[in-house]
Structure formats: structure tokens, C-alpha cells
Amino acid sequence: MGRDMENNRTVRAVAFDHKAVLRAPGHAHDGIPELLRWLEERDVAFALLTTDPMQASTALAAARLPAPALHLSHDDIPDKKNRGSGVWLETVAERLMLRTNQLLLVGTTKWDWLTGINTGVLHPRELGQPRHRCEGA
């Protein structure tokens, strides 16, 4: 398999619902700074999704987090479709010049899950729980 084909199948961006990143103004959820750093080291962009417009860079900076490659609010979505519509992630893919199969979605509600399903984008909830726990691995 050629390098270009391999890159076409690789996750190139992760879209996060803002509630999955910030637990309160100025405070990130545990592990988020490390996760965003890990993504950046692997040249994987992150996008922030919010229902209400906000100053994403300012809100993330207050929590000592980097600015997203892309921030979309309800106002940025064609026809102002609500969460649950695949248009949200189609817009992320379009703006980042990717295909939807190159995205991963991290959310907190059933609406985020439905957004992923309606776009064909993997949401961690779909992964389920591990059947076996590996000890000492």
C-alpha cells in the first residue's frame, strides 16, 4: 500500500465537543492537556465544537490549552442544523480539507454520538468496553 493511500486512511483530526475539553471556565478535564499535546506531536489537528459562539482561543488559553485548528459554533453550520446532524462533521472535514473518514469525534451527549453516526465518523462510545483487561501490559 502506497504512502498516500495510507495517509488517506489515517485519522487526521479529532473534533471535540467543548464540554469534553473544559469542565469549567479556565479548567480542562484531567488528561486533556496531555491528549492535545499527544495529538499535536502526531500532526493530528483538533477542532472544537460549540453550540453557542465563544472565543475558543481565549477560553482554551485560560485553561492553558492550545488554540484549536478549527472552532465551529451553531452559527457556522450550513442551514444552522442542530447537533445530531452530520453537517457538523461534514463542515469540519470541508474546512480542514479532509474526508469524514479521517475524523474522530469526542463528545459528551447522545447528540454528539448521533452527529458521528449521521456522518459515519467513529465516536469512542461506539468502541464499547474492553472485554478483557490486560494486566502488566
Image (spheres, helix red, strand yellow):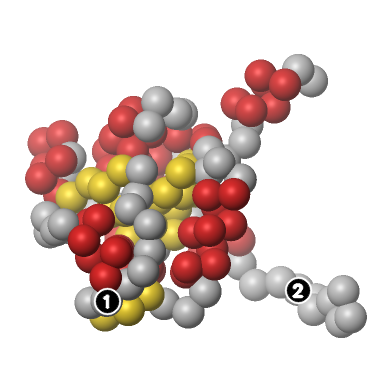
Expressed as whole percent of the image width and height from the top left, the position of residue 136 reads 89, 80
Secondary-structure class at tag 1: loop
Q: Relative to residue 124, is residue 137 drawn left or right?
A: right
Q: Which mark is residue 131?
A: 2
In the depicted structure, whether residue 55 falls above or below residue 96: below
Expressed as whole percent of the image width and height from the top left, the position of residue 8 reads 60, 26
Q: Can residue 11 be seen in this view?
A: yes
Q: What residue did someone put label 1 on?
A: 26
Name the foreground residue: 93 vs 132. Answer: 93
> 10 Å neighbourhood of mark 2: few (<14), some, or many (≥20)?
few
- The residue drawn where x is 22% and y is 57% is 56
The kind of residue on which mark 2 rests is Arg
Discs 1, 2 touching: Cβ within 8 Å: no
- The residue drawn where x is 26% and y is 70% is 62
Q: Is residue 110 visible?
A: no
C-alpha span from label 1 to label 2:
36 Å
Q: Relative to residue 42, is residue 49 drawn left or right?
A: left
Q: Relative to residue 43, is residue 29 drawn left or right?
A: left
Mark 1 against mark 2, which lies toward the viewer? 1
Question: Where the N terminus falls, by quadrant?
Answer: top right
In the depicted structure, whether residue 35 falls above or below residue 92: below
Name the foreground residue: 69 vs 3. Answer: 69
Residue lying farthest right? 136
- The residue drawn where x is 44% and y is 28% is 98
The kind of residue on which mark 1 rests is Gly
Expressed as whole percent of the image width and height from the top left, the position of residue 88 reads 28, 43
Q: Which mark is residue 124?
A: none
